[in-house]
Image (cartoon, helix red, strand yellow):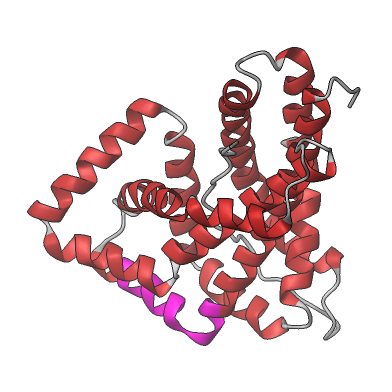
């Protein structure tokens, strides 16, 4: 059975550089597009695009035994086009925020501060650095060392992950994307006989332990690397914001936006993969 390699952690909001002012109570897509730009979502999406293109190569080896060729590369390039991803994200964020101007105000207040700007810049910089396998290995070793040499700092990193529900949220997001990939394969006629939805769900849930382990293995080294420049007091301030009502709602909205983005592109990848396997034009 195919095991799509789609897990991707939706961490980091980008740098908020100025307040967002809404003249009306109903949030429009134009508002959230502006908010995303202020949050430097384009910088984060550029990293996600690079991650997706790398995963696309892994998928070619897994699905097509390395024979996907230019046709599969064209699919990956289209799906992970940054403008395409940004449109999907903006639509998802508009739906996630609905008319919640209070959450936008909370995001503006924290991420518009000097600390907020530095935090988010560090997150994107660290995520970009982890595109390099050597940096991933070094960050993992550094996290293991931190747990024994600086237990208070390690515990603080773990509190941050818990405050933002980063493990479960990322696991759920990855599994939703994997299920969407199967749905895309089914829509494209890849399964003979057809695969029932319950069978797809069973297959996805069978991957949960591996997805969770991969998430944990990536998450903590990432957080330790990203927040290394912050003092303990600064990280405590970030945790306090995350635990506040506004911070919690902001986190949920961002995850929902990225979840909808990854579900859309995963289904698109599945459908295109099915057509390629059948020898059809895409």
Q: Is residue 191 left or right of residue 165?
A: right
Q: Does 22 lie within the magenta span?
A: no
Q: Is residue 167 left or right of residue 235?
A: right
- Name the residue furthest front: 193
* Residue 121: % across, % down: 49, 50
From this view, report whether residue 162 is shown above or below residue 262: below
* Residue at 30% across, 52% down: 224
Q: Main secondary structure of the magenta part?
A: helix
Q: Is residue 59 visible?
A: yes
Say which of 72 and 190 sits in front.
190
* Residue 100: % across, % down: 72, 83
Q: Quadrant of the C terminus?
A: top right
Say which of 25 and 2 sits in front.
2
- Name the residue furthest left: 149
From this view, report whether residue 265 is shown above or below residue 281: below
- Name the residue furthest right: 281
* Residue at 41% across, 51% down: 215
Q: Is residue 89 left or right of residue 211?
A: right
* Residue 79: % across, % down: 76, 36
Say which of 137 and 7 sits in front.
7
Q: How many marks?
A: 0
Q: Which residues are magenta?
A: 235-248
* Residue at 29% across, 65% down: 158
Q: Is residue 15 visible?
A: no
From this view, report whether residue 6 is shown above or below residue 28: above
* Residue 272: % across, % down: 80, 33
């Amino acid at each position: 059975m195919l095991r799509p390699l789609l897990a991707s952690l939706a961490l980091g909001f980008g740098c908020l550089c100025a307040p967002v002012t809404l003249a009306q109570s109903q949030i429009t897509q134009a508002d959230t597009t502006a908010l995303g730009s202020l949050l430097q979502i384009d910088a984060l999406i550029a990293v996600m695009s690079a991650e997706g293109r790398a995963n696309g190569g892994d998928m070619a080896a897994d699905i097509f035994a390395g024979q996907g060729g230019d046709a599969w590369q064209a699919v990956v390039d289209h799906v992970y086009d940054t403008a395409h991803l940004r449109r999907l994200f903006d639509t998802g964020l508009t739906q996630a925020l609905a008319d919640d101007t209070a959450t936008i105000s909370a995001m503006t207040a924290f991420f518009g501060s000097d600390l907020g700007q530095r935090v988010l810049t560090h997150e994107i910089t660290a995520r970009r650095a982890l595109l390099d396998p050597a940096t991933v290995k070094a960050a993992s070793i550094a996290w293991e060392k931190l747990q024994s040499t600086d237990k208070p700092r390690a515990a603080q990193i773990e509190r941050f992950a818990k405050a933002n529900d980063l493990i479960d949220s990322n696991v759920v997001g990855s599994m939703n994307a994997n299920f969407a990939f199967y749905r895309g394969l089914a829509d494209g006629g890849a399964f003979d006989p057809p695969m029932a939805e319950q069978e797809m769900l069973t297959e996805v849930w069978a991957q949960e332990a591996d997805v969770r382990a991969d998430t944990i293995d990536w998450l903590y080294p990432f957080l330790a690397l990203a927040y290394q420049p912050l003092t303990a007091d600064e990280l405590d301030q970030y945790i306090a914001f995350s635990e506040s009502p506004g911070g919690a709602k902001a986190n949920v909205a961002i995850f929902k936006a990225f979840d909808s983005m990854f579900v859309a592109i995963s289904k698109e990848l599945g459908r295109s993969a099915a057509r390629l396997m059948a020898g059809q034009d895409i």
